[in-house]
Structures are given as C-alpha cells and as structure tokens.
DNA sequence: GGAGAAAGGTGTTTTAGTCACATACAGACC
DNA sequence: GGTCTGTATGTGACTAAAACACCTTTCTCC
C-alpha cells in the first residue's frame, strides 16, 4: 500500500503507465503495490526461481543474464526505470520457472505487485495489458536480435556495435574489459585483444577501467 | 467464418484451447476465424512484415528462423499443431514489426484470426489470455535456451544435443547435413565433419539424407 | 612501501568456419 | 543397362576466432 500523496504523485510523474491510466486504476495500483528499496549488487531472481510477484523498476537498473557452468556470462537485457522484468511477467502468466539471473546494478526502487493482482489487471485494465504485452514483446525482439548477433557476427563487429551503443552516453566510459566480456558472452582476453587492435587503429583509447571512444565513424564502419 | 458442424467438431477435438473453452467463446471463435490451407515451403511472414492477423496452426509444421546476410540460417523454433506464431502474437499486441522469417515445412492448416479480434479476446476470455501468454512465455524461454547454447556450447555438443532431441521420434531420421546446419546456425561442412567423427566413435550411422542414431547414451555423454 | 586484489597483456592450442574441389548416390530418360 | 544431372556428402588446406594458461601492471588499503 502506497498512501502518501507526495509519493503517489512522484510515481505518477515518473511512470508513464500511471500517467496515462484512469484514476480508478491508479487507486487500485497504489492499494496493491509496495515500494521497496534494493541495494546495488543484489540478486533478485535466479535460475529456476518461482515468481510470486511482479517487480516494476521505478529507479535504478537491473541486469538480466545467463550464467554458464564455465563461469562465463551473457547479458540478455537490462531493465531501466519504468520497465518491468518481463521474464517475471512471463513466468507469472505462464507459471514456468525463471530461466536466468536478475541482479541490481545500482540501488533500485521497485514497485512490487502480487502476481495474482498483476494477472487480474491484464483482464481488467487496457493500459496495464498493453504495458505487459509491450514489455514481453520488446524483450522477445531484444533476445532474438542478441541471438542473431551471437550466431552470425564476429566478436570485433559485436564489440564495435557495443562501443557505439555505450558511446551514446558520452565518449568517455568507465568500464572494464571484464564487464564488456560479461555483457557479450565472451572472455576478457578476447575483449582485451580486440580493444588493443582498435586502439592500434586509433578508434579508441583505453586506460585502467576506462575507455574513450575516439573515432565513432571508424567503429561504425566495422559493423558491416 | 467456420460454420460446418463437422468442421467445428474437428477443430474442437484437435485444439485444447477450444476443448476447454465456453460454448460462448467457441461460437465467437468460429465466427471470426477462417481456416486456410498453406502448401509446404511457403513463406508466411518475413523480416519486417506487419502482422494484421494471428495464425494458429491446426495441422502441419512451421519453421521460424533468422537469415544472415551470409546466407547462413538459424532456427528459432518450430510451430506445431495447436501452437500459434508467437512472434505474430507479440507483434500484434505491441505493434512492432516481425523480426524473423516463418515458413511452412509441411502443408499447413491454419486458423486465421483478425488481430483486432485476437486482442479483444485477451481482454474478454481467460482461456484465450492464458493461451497467448503461455505461447509467448514458452517461446521466450525457448529462445533464451537457444541463445545459451549458441553462446556457451561447442558445436559437437550442440549437434549431440540436437541428435538426442530428434532421436525421440525414433532412431532413424530423414535429414540432411544441410538441414542440421540451418537449424543450428552453422555450415554444412562443420556438420559433416562432426557427424563423421561421431560415426567413427560408433554413435551414429549416416546415409544419403538419412541418419541412424546408434548409441544414445554415448551422445548424452557428449552434452556435458 | 608492501600485500593482495583487480585489471590488462601475450604465447600457444583448439575449434569453427571458408574455399575449393572430389566423390557418391538417386532418379529421370533414353 | 547406361548416361546424365542435380543433390548430398567427404575432405584437405587454410584462416582466423576464441579458449586456455600464465604473466605483468596498476591500484587500494593497511
């Protein structure tokens, strides 16, 4: 239950679903939802978990990834503010176990909704239904795109694409080779070698835990 | 519109969703659905198609795959009787373009439902909603499992797993190396070589367009 | 300033994919 | 039966990813 008026207003302002919903739905939402704080680095759901509730991220970021027996990882996608963990949604709707690991990367505020309630709203609320379907579909498309990349593209192309994506947040990024490897599902050495090669071509400059993108068009030329 | 009583009965018997649904929903379903016949080898939807309707496969089999510029392919999943093309479902619900290619592998009978109708039933019919969510979730889980395989497993392990899966339909399978390669997202030569290796170990016996699985436990030992 | 952790580097080996071409088999047609 | 043709499979040589094992550098914190 979320009953503070200020809190409610803050959620409405930060969450398009609520912004567009009827007053009636908002009331029901605030009655059923709980706002929880989760610290960075916390595992929310792991391989095989059952999902008794749906979490909608209100602030912060969650990483959903697969872990191989070898210890290698690959990031399936990230959940940002306003998104929900679709896998949770999908598990709830179909009552199958969760097939990956979800871990907070930053401190996260999340709205937790009991799964029964979330299911009922799919029936009763058009905006909620649209929200849930939109999430699942987008993720399905994301995962398929990722699969295509992994199956068909070379590592240097994938790293170039990755760098282009992160460069949108500015040319200087704090990131380690290990983190890049975990996102892309490869090993650190491979990332190191390819980044070295990029550095030789003047595309990027690396430093410990930091990477500066120098030549964005040069990287883009790599992706084809 | 499907109005023959015999036809209706046939669909009810062959399609669990209808079997479990109310008489009212069945009526609405038969009013909106059209039964179409699609020959083998026909492309139903391709990269970027918009989805104006939802097809539920009643008999036959559809393969959904990604095609790389290089010509290599990888099968995302197959749609069998009673399943629907989730990607279509997902496109309809979220109004995003179709991210793969769907092609009939056998002659297919499909029930075609206008997308508006399919959307409305998600609101109005609990069995339909369960059906659609179940489909999408299962596919999401399938695609994630496939991604895990591609990202983390060696080709010989993947082929072994593939053979184990097809062996469930009997030890003798009519399949070409090229088809296996297209399913797994690799090239024919790689498949040929690995199958030869398996043959040398007495795990399988190959012939033109045919493969006999000899030693299932031996293959299973490969998958770990 | 030294221990230990974290980040990054490099040589060697394994695996996957490419290219080019050889061979083998199944029908169709004479 | 023999020949032709298209599809299926085998294979050697090569390239280049990527894995593995191990090493060096840099930072942090006491």
Image: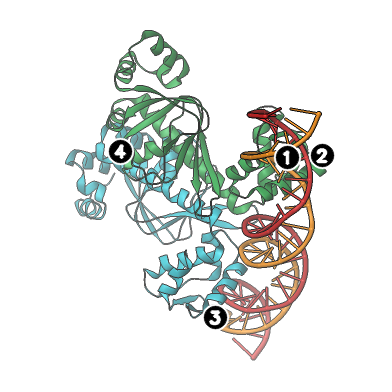
Chain colours: A cyan, B green, C red, D orange
Q: Is residue A128 visible?
A: yes
Labels 2, 1: front one: 2
The residue identified by callout 2 is B202
Residue at 67% x, 44% y: name it: B159
Q: CA distance from mark 2 to mark 1?
A: 13 Å
Element at label 4: helix
Name which residue lies at 26% across and 36% down.
Answer: A125
Local packing at callout 4 (Cα closer than 10 Å; few below 14, some 14-19, many 20+) is many
- Depth-wise, is mark 2 or mark 4 nearer the camera? 2
Q: In the visual, does B60 lie left or right of B203?
A: left
Chain name for mark 3: A
Disc 1: CA contacts within 10 A as few (<14), some (14-19) or many (>=20)? some
Q: Are marks 2 and 4 in contact (CB under 8 Å)?
A: no
Q: Residue A172's quadrant in the figure?
A: bottom left
The residue at which mark 3 appears reads as A200
Residue B44 location (% of width, % of height): 42, 35
Callout 4: chain: A
Does dot 3 land on a helix, a strand or a loop? Answer: helix
Q: Is residue A38 above or below residue B60?
A: below
The circle on residue A129 is 4
Marks 1 and 3, Cα distance to the nearest angstrom? 45 Å
Give the position of the N terminus of chain B as an image quadrant.
top left
Disc 3 to disc 2, C-alpha distance: 49 Å
Name the element at disc 2.
loop
Per the image, the residue denoted by label 1 is B220
């Amino acid at each position: 239950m979320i009953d503070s008026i200020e809190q409610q207003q803050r959620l409405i302002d930060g969450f398009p679903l609520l912004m567009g919903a009827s007053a009636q739905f908002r009331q029901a939402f605030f009655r059923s939802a709980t706002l929880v704080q989760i610290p960075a680095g916390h595992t929310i759901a792991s391989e095989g978990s059952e999902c008794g509730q749906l979490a909608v991220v209100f602030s912060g970021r969650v990483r959903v990834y697969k872990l191989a027996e070898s210890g290698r990882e690959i990031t399936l996608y990230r959940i940002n503010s306003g998104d929900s963990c679709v896998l949770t949604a999908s598990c709830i709707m179909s009552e199958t176990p969760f097939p990956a690991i979800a871990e907070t990367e930053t401190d996260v505020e999340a709205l937790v909704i009991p799964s029964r309630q979330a299911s009922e709203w799919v029936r009763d609320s058009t905006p909620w239904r649209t929200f849930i379907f939109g999430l699942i579909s987008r993720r399905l498309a994301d995962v398929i795109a990722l699969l295509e990349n992994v199956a068909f593209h070379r590592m240097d192309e994938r790293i170039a694409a990755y760098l282009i994506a992160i460069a949108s947040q500015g040319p200087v990024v704090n990131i380690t080779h290990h983190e890049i490897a975990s996102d892309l599902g490869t090993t650190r050495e491979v990332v190191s070698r390819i980044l070295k090669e990029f550095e030789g071509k003047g595309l990027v400059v690396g430093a410990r835990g930091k990477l500066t993108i120098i030549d964005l068009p040069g990287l883009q030329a790599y992706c084809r």
